[in-house]
């Protein structure tokens, strides 16, 4: 997994689940092009779109 220490330092925030960060930054087109299973941000996008409807 990539080291996101510089990003976390600049944001002033430490991500607890680094895999969620990777998922959020991985576009579905990149995930589709890979020969191995790669999770992408589409699931998180749908979740983010649904949350305002619940409020």
Image: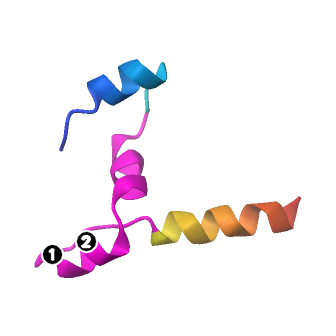
Looking at this view, name the residue that lies furthest to the left.
35
Number of the label disc, if any, that sits on residue 18: none
Mark 1–mark 2 contact, CB under 8 Å?
A: yes
Instruction: Give the residue pinned by disc 1.
Output: 34
The structure residue drawn at horizontal position 48% and vertical position 19%, both measured from the top left corner, is 12
Q: Residue at x 46, y 25 (%)?
A: 11
19 or 8, nearer to the observer:
8
Looking at the figure, which quarter contains the C terminus?
Answer: bottom right
Asked if the magenta segment contains residue 19, the reply would be: yes
Residue 30 or residue 18, whichever sits in front = 30
Q: Quadrant of the N terminus?
A: top left
Observer-side mark, 1 or 2, equals 2
The residue sitting at the front extreme is 10
Stretch of the chain drawn in magenta: 16-41
- Asked if 31 appears above or below 55 in the picture, the reply is below
Numbered disc 1: secondary structure: loop
Quadrant location of residue 10? top left
What residue occupies the far right of the structure in this picture? 55
Which residue matches tag 2?
Answer: 30
Residue count near mark 2 (Cα–Cα under 10 Å), binned few <14, some 14–19, many ≥20: few
Residue located 43% across and 64% down the image: 41
User: In the rendered view, does 52 fall on the left or right side of 2?
Assistant: right
Residue at 37% in and 19% down: 9
Question: Would you place residue 15 above or below residue 28 in this image?
Answer: above
Question: Image quadrant of residue 6?
Answer: top left
């Amino acid at each position: 997994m990539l080291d996101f220490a510089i990003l976390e330092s600049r944001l002033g925030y430490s991500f607890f689940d680094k895999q969620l960060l990777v998922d959020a930054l991985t576009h579905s087109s990149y995930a589709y092009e890979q020969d191995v299973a790669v999770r992408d941000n589409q699931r998180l996008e749908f979740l983010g779109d649904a949350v305002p409807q619940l409020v």
